[in-house]
Image (cartoon, helix red, strand yellow):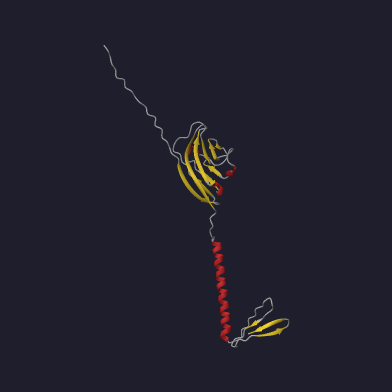
Amino acid sequence: PLHMSNPSHSASCLCVISQHALAVVMEVYAGEKSILLPCQYSGFPPEDDPAVMWTRSDLDPKSVHLLREGGDDLSGQNQRYSGRTSVRSDALKTGNYSLTLREPQLTDSGSYTCSISDGRQEKTLRVIQLQVKGQQQTSTPAVNTTLLVLLVLLLVGFGGLLFYFRQYFMSGESLLLHYYYGVGVTMTIVKNRVPRALFQEAGSAPTLVC
């Protein structure tokens, strides 16, 4: 007898999920204390030689910050970032690969790439376009207070001067104003007199009497 069997074929499907890097635009003023460039990873890091990498492709060397299992590896870091970057020491455990950039400068503007590597391949997680603007000009409270005090003093002085003139004119007394010019001309104004011009010799300098 011929025995026929219908073998059962089982198919296995390998699903590969592609995670597209999200480009984020961030702005900061130069001179700020720091800025945090976010990068989160919910997957598992590579088992062999895992590393978190922050890079700028327009620089040479392009390394901004490199974190390995044993800690920071800044031997290949671009010198313009020396002492100004940090990543959490437990980043490979928590998946928080965010980069702290201290004292941002105008030259820090550019495209920053956050990726994870096993030494052979790199996986891009996030691309951030950082724009560093010129230092923000703000008026400090101390400057505003000083300007206000000067304005008040100016108004008080002007008011006192007006009161002084008013008292003289209202009292009917003579008001003498002397203006000294480079040629030594003296102008005298006497209240309740018809103006007249008369030049007299007073020593070596002429005198104008009104």
Q: Quadrant of the N terminus?
A: top left
Residue at the right extreme of this rendering: 204
Q: Is residue 103 visible?
A: no
Residue projecting furthest to the bottom: 193
Is residue 28 shown to the viewer in this render? Answer: yes
State left or right for residue 185 relative to residue 22. Answer: right
Height in image: 99 above or below 173? Answer: above
Q: Is residue 157 above or below residue 41?
A: below
Please, which residue is most extreme toward the top here? 1
On screen, residue 163 above or below 106: below
For the image, the number of numbered tags is 0
Left or right of 80 in this view: 205: right
State the image coordinates of residue 134 (x, y, percent, origin top left).
54, 53
Q: Residue at x 49, y 36 (%)?
A: 116
Residue 200 placement (x, y as % from top left): 69, 85
Q: What residue is rendered at 57% in x and 75% in y? A: 158
Pick the quarter of the image with the C terminus: bottom right
Q: Nearer the viewer, residue 151 or 91?
A: 151
Measuring from the top left, give residue 112's x and y in whole percent.
51, 43
Say which of 104 and 25 sits in front.
25
Residue at position x 66%, y 83% in the image: 208
Q: Is residue 175 above or below residue 2?
A: below
Residue 100: percent from the left, percent from the top? 52, 45
